[in-house]
Image: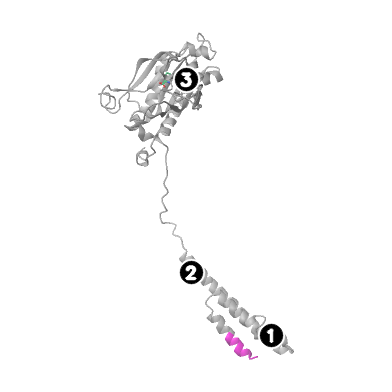
């Protein structure tokens, strides 16, 4: 074997290698088991030749190691350069949602009443005729009991037509004093128009304690209307009728569009109806086993859609149900 020739061939092959794999190939070619040099080493008989060939093998191996390291470093440099991430570039914009206007109003109502010490209830939407009508003292002939006005699931169950059944549940579950607000969906068999939708939301309030008067009801409603519409709006009360309150009233808020002058939104009256209210009827107390001589209270119910529409000047109730982002993004 020509040691010098082997050395120069091996070193130039290693030098010429452009990748770590090519260095490995050269290593196998010159130092592998079947290569000339290792074969010669195995056949060596004298010490001198052995030392010479061993030194040669070490030089080739070291040269391969050095080349491999050099190529490896170059590769790393290239990847660091090419795969560099510019952390100062603006990122991809992810769409961020927000709460639906109904949910926003719901939370405002909850905040206003939590601030007054009320507890918040969330009741069932499938209600029995007993809770939706009977215990609330609806007359047997009341129009709302008709399947033309109300969605009946069967003879005894309906989709609740108002949140007022929460009054009964609360009074059956808890001894007064009671201060509660119940918020949720209600259902009525109405055709869909700009002002009506067969599903909508109400918030229902109930306060039962000793010595509660109509003045307490009016003060509470004024407080809440101001929380929802701001301090500038006037609140007035008209008499009305509900089966489960006596006397019954309807609160109006002065029209924010015209400031009470009269416009299309308020049908030229200057006022907008907010819902119903009144003093808890003695029959309701009797129906839940409370003594009407010992306890008194008030109740009220208002629509959340109406509230959201008035806060944002949304003329058509359908906009709140269609999920059109062009509309919802504005609020
Ligand atoms: N439940 C009545 C309605 O939906 C509103 C109301 C609630 C009236 C509580 C009086 C007391 O019209």
Scheme of colours in the image: one colour
Local SS, label 2: helix
Distance between mark 3 and mark 2 Cα atoms: 73 Å
Instruction: Give the dominant element type of the magenta stretch: helix, strand or loop.
Output: helix
Q: Give the quarter of the figure containing the N terminus.
A: bottom right
Residue 213's mark? none
Residue furthest to the right in view is 45
Residue sticking out furthest to the bottom = 2
Residue 40 place in picture, x, y as percent: 69, 87
Can residue 63 be seen at all in this image of the molecule? no
For ligand 1, the image quadrant comes to: top left
Say whether mark 3 is within 8 Å of ligand 1. yes
Check if residue 6 falls in the magenta segment: yes
Residue shown at the point (61%, 79%) measured from the top left: 27
The residue pinned by badge 2 equals 78
Question: How packed is label 2: few (under 14 Cα within 10 Å), some, or many (20 or more)?
Answer: few
Q: Specify whether tag 2 is near ligand 1 (CB below 8 Å).
A: no
Q: Earlier in the sequence, mark 3 or mark 2?
A: 2
Look at the image and tell me whether residue 5 can be seen: yes
- In primary-sequence order, the first of circles 2 and 1 is 1
Q: Are marks 3 and 1 in contact (CB under 8 Å)?
A: no
Decide which of tag 3 and tag 1 comes sooner along the chain.
1
> Residue 206: which disc?
3
Image x and y of residue 295, in percent:
50, 12
Number of other residues with Cα within 10 Å of mark 3, as a class: few under 14, some 14 to 19, many 20 or more: many
Q: Which mark is residue 39?
A: 1
Closer to viewer: mark 2 or mark 1: 1
User: Which region of the structure is painted magenta?
Assistant: 1-9
- Front one among 35 and 242: 242
């Amino acid at each position: 074997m020509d040691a010098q020739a082997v050395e120069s061939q091996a070193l130039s092959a290693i030098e010429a290698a452009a990748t770590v794999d090519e260095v490995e190939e050269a290593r196998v070619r010159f130092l592998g088991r079947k290569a000339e040099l290792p074969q010669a080493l195995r056949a060596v008989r004298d010490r001198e030749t052995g030392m010479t060939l061993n030194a040669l093998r070490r030089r080739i191996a070291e040269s391969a190691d050095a080349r491999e390291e050099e190529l490896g470093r170059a590769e790393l440099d290239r990847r660091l350069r090419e795969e560099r991430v510019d952390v100062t570039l603006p990122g991809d914009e992810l769409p961020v949602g927000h709460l639906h206007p109904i949910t926003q109003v719901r939370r405002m109502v909850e905040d206003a009443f939590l601030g007054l010490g009320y507890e918040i209830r969330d009741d069932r939407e499938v209600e029995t005729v007993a809770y939706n009508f009977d215990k609330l003292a609806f007359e047997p002939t009341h129009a709302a009991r008709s399947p033309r006005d109300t969605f009946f699931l069967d003879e005894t169950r309906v989709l609740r037509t108002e949140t007022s059944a929460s009054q009964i549940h609360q009074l059956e579950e808890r001894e007064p004093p009671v201060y509660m607000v119940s918020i949720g969906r209600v259902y009525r068999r109405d055709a869909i128009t700009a002002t009506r939708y067969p599903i909508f939301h109400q918030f229902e309030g109930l306060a039962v304690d000793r010595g509660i008067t109509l003045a307490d009801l009016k003060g509470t409603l004024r407080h809440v209307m101001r929380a929802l519409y701001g301090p500038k709006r006037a609140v007035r009360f008209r008499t009305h009728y509900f089966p489960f309150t006596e006397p019954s009233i309807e609160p109006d808020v002065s029209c924010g569009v015209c400031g009470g002058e009269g416009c299309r939104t308020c049908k030229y009256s200057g006022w907008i109806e907010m819902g119903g209210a009144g003093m808890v009827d003695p029959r309701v107390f009797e129906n839940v086993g409370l003594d009407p001589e010992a306890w008194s209270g008030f109740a009220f119910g208002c629509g959340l859609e109406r509230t959201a529409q008035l806060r944002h000047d949304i003329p058509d109730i359908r906009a709140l149900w269609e999920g059109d982002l062009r509309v919802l993004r504005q609020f």
